[in-house]
Image (tube, grey):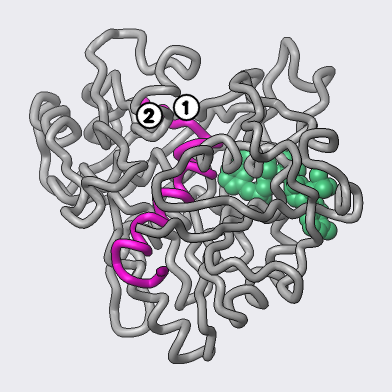
Amino acid sequence: MKKIPAAILGATGSVGQRFVQLLDQHPWFDVVCLTGSERTIGTRYGETCRWLLTDPMPEWAKDIVVSPTDPAKVDQPLVFSALPTDIAKTVEADFAAKGSMVCSNASAFRMADDVPILIPEANAEHAKLVEVQRSQRGWKGGIVTNSNCTSTGITVAFKAMLDAFGIDKAFVVSMQALSGAGFPGVPSMDVIDNLIPFIGGEEHKVQTEPLKMLGTINGNKIDFADFPISAHTNRVGITDGHTVCASLALKKKPSVAEAIEAIRSYQAPEICRDLPSTPRPVLLYRNEDNRPQPRMDRMTGKGMTTVVGRLREDPIFDVKMVICSHNTIRGAAGGSVYNAELLTKMGYLS
Ligand SMILES: NC(=O)c1ccc[n+]([C@@H]2O[C@H](COP(=O)([O-])OP(=O)(O)OC[C@H]3O[C@@H](n4cnc5c(N)ncnc54)[C@H](OP(=O)(O)O)[C@@H]3O)[C@@H](O)[C@H]2O)c1
């Protein structure tokens, strides 16, 4: 198969760098363009990008000259976006109109009726909304988004519970890593020896995005899943990996063993079980009393697996559990790459 040429928009940032790392030697996609802001346009990526990852920067990326984030000058059929939301709002639509398939991390289009928040192991069929975008907006390409990084792990674990038992309501408390705020992110003096019980806009995203992802396609839009989520979101002094404590009231009342079995046996839809970025396994249940932990568990399945543990009875709800997911891999760049693979397999990209 001839590789599909790809661009990364916002390639110098926290998520953009993850794209560069994860797309190194990708079997289907070939990154030929990296874009940035006025700050970096025209400079060599190897000189201008403050590389934050422990793996070295791939050699091929070092000599790429950073391009403007301009659809008139970037014409790859596949575009990965790690742009700030305000920029994404206009730029991503222009790319989609011109014919690029945009796999975005930004929140700009997440709540549009005809744009899916795609998470292949939970809602692969939502990708069909790309056809609605093409017929209603006249776009030659399209946009699919990732969820906010905290919603990702929640949604995968909740999907297993929803399918097996139905969900009445959920209560979640997050402990979110610093890399979720981009670079340089939260000042060290604010977060060392401390935690911050507020992340702007985050609680609303965590209370709504999983419901769209867990919803069902109805004609040209998605009917959201019909249960409320109450969320507290907190920033903590961890580099990578978001952890969520979740309590769930369920329609059918399982035993703890049955609920654990539902997590263990959850299977992704057939179409996304064998893609290059497929999480293996989709969900891992850990038996230890003190797991999952972000430092120990975030790289499970190359950072793509959602790790669950401490599933037990909840005296107010029915069950409670701890969920851990890598925010810049599964919750951001890795999720987008997985989405692009699914779109390729479904024939929306060639
Ligand atoms: N971090 C996470 O865990 C995470 C998870 C899910 C989603 N997201 C979303 O992903 C996006 C990127 O987040 P991030 O954490 O990587 O942010 P970041 O580290 O602040 O990086 C922002 C990137 O956007 C570029 N940029 C800034 N202003 C621009 C402009 N006017 N025109 C073109 N490019 C511009 C920057 O380029 P220069 O370096 O050249 O200025 C940089 O490459 C955001 O929408 C965020 O909400 C992040």
Q: Which residue is mark 1?
A: 243
* Rendering coords of residue 238 (x, y %): 61, 19
* Depth order, front residue of 316/60: 60
* Rendering coords of residue 70 (x, y %): 76, 69
Q: Earlier in the sequence, mark 2 or mark 1?
A: 1
Is 141 in the magenta? no
Q: Considering the image in quadrants, where does the N terminus appear?
A: bottom left
* Rendering coords of residue 141 (x, y %): 51, 77
Determine whether label 2 and label 1 are within 8 Å by CB. yes
Callout 2 secondary element: strand
* Res. 199 in view: no
Image: 315 above or below 140: above
* Depth order, front residue of 92/250: 92
Q: Which residue is mark 2?
A: 323
Kindly identify the amino acid type of the residue bearing the numbered disc 2.
Ile
State the residue lying farthest toward the right. 39
Image: 255 above or below 164: above
Kindly identify the amino acid type of the residue bearing the numbered disc 1.
Thr
Magenta-colored span: 322-350
Callout 1 secondary element: strand
Q: Considering the image in quadrants, where does the C terminus appear?
A: bottom left
